[in-house]
Amino acid sequence: MLKTLLSGLLLAALALFAPQDGLAAHGVSIDGKLKYPAGYAQFDYTSPAAKKGGALTLHDIGSFDKMNPFTLKGTPPFGLDSFIFETLAVSSLDEPFAAYGLIAKDIELAADKKSVTFTLNEQAKFADGSAVTAEDVKFSLETLKSDKAHPFYQMYYQDISGAEVLEPLKIRFNFAKVNRELHLIASQLPVLSKKFYQQHGFGEGSKADPMLPPLGSGPYLVKEVNPGKTITYARNPKHWAADHPARKGMFNFDTVTIKYFKDQVVGVEAFKAGEFDFMWANVAKQWQRDLTGHLFDSGKLVRKEFPHHNNAGMQGFLCNTRRPLFSSRKVRQALGLAFDFEWANEALFYGQYTRNNSYFSNSDLAATGLPGEAELKLLKPLQEKYPNDMPPEVFTQPLTAPSTAPPNSLRGNLKQAQQLLAEEGWTVQNGALTKDGKPFEFEILLTGSFFDRVMAPYVKNLAKLGIKAEYRTIDPALYEDRIKKFDFDMVVHSVGQSQSPGNEQRDHWASSSAERQGSGNLAGIKSPVVDSLVDALIYADNQSDLTAACKALDRVLWHSHYMVPNWYLAYHRVAFANKFKMPDKLPLYYNPYNLLWTWWTEQGK
């Protein structure tokens, strides 16, 4: 689902049992089970002791140049989508695929599963006091599905064919196909003000100031903006959902200010100087060596590791197959053999990381061993139909990343890489790997200098093969623009996954997204095998079928070598000022900012 999980609503009397089709409910899940019954007080990972008040200062890297988070061009400020806008329902962070009504108070899935009807909460209001209506919801769906919005939404809501306003606070979404998670996807729709965007415009056609603060129904208002440098949000004292069980104990700070820094190195020093309050550490060196000193020793700053159960997905060095240089699967495999993860983990990462072994790492959806019967039912027909697009190793080799741990070695891996390159016509001439008189040269584009120490030894290993690779760090805004336009050879890329993958897989891997600027298909994958498996995943009838489709897709992606596998953590590394109070219980599936929104300070009331 949209970079997360989703859901809708369930009858109180049936809250602990499988829902019956055609019944409206306070929450929904894919498997029919809900942790929280109708009338629940608040989520368990929030606290009834939480107080409102105080100020929070955060940081981000780069800059921002627009106030619309739903369009392709430009960069919005951090927090705009979650602070200003709200969705029909919100995900529970301690269930794998469940959500509970927010703007929608009831969700009714039709018996034939071809439509879902939302009844809106009559208390729901935008920040100007105007009511949220079914017309706003219809406008939101049609706008986000249009070419005015980021192309992700067109892919994500593709199977929602349209919406019908039934009453001022009641709307039905019709589905093009039966999809067991589509009513959950629909419930994740951000609700926009029709009046506001008709007045000021939406997207590139708008003549309004791109820094005009948007109108939403969320817990905060935009208080102050210094374009590209800082933004301050102020808690809306009249927020309609302040005491809603899906919001209680959350968004507690009176103000949230985001400061922008040039890069993460500068950001770390600013944090240690007290310029902001909370930092999610994504770099091992920063965690092990930089986030130390007298402020930590004195207790003014705190370092803490928070365990999670997230599907870790895949991170790796991604090859842009739109470039002829990377069109060969064997060539891409050779590039993977040149990366020495074991050395990097010990010498650079202090042994903190686990190697990615799947596109669904750290989850039950990851393929293991050789394909089982359920996977073979999907894979064998595709092998017969598209033999040139099905890697033969899918059936003969488990998912195993290249290793230099004994008895393996970097020398042995490079020798295997040489053989693969030779099979594709690449030979070393005067120390340079060439084919048809052209050298093997490419650029690795980076958005932060912290990856230099990873790339330097990797580039050195590639040079042993005769490959000339260079790495370059560019401005974050320029980097983002080039990514959107697929203007790169290789980048470091992370593909996050939810506990129940679905429509977003089209954006990651489908042929239809390969040439659509701004899509998540950075590798440029155009494979009928992948397309078929993505469809099998999206339209799976049950959890067993979904798991089989994920594992089959996992095998094809892995053995196609689109990415050189990197690493992941099964916990979050967070540093913060010692001024926060937090709930006793952690959620299961979350990022550190989800956690932060449940914290508060003693300055609160």
Image (spheres, helix red, strand yellow):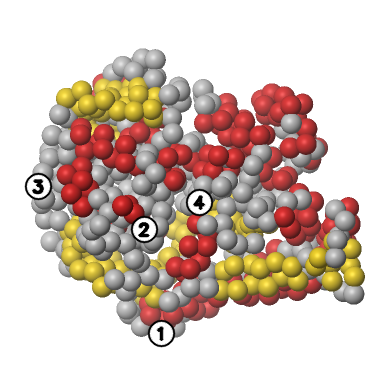
Mark found first going from the N terminus, 2 or 4: 4
Q: Which mark is residue 294?
A: 1
Residue 268 image-quadrant placement: bottom left
Q: Which residue is mark 4?
A: 517
Mark found first going from the N terminus, 1 or 4: 1
Q: Which residue is mark 2?
A: 593
Dot in front, 2 or 3: 3
Residue 521: image location, x then y, percent: 56, 48
Mark found first going from the N terminus, 2 or 3: 3
Residue 565: image location, x then y, percent: 66, 55
Dot in front, 1 or 4: 4
Q: Amino acid at mark 3?
A: Gly
Residue 196: image location, x then y, percent: 18, 48
Dot in front, 2 or 4: 4
Dot in front, 4 or 3: 4
Q: Amino acid at mark 1?
A: His
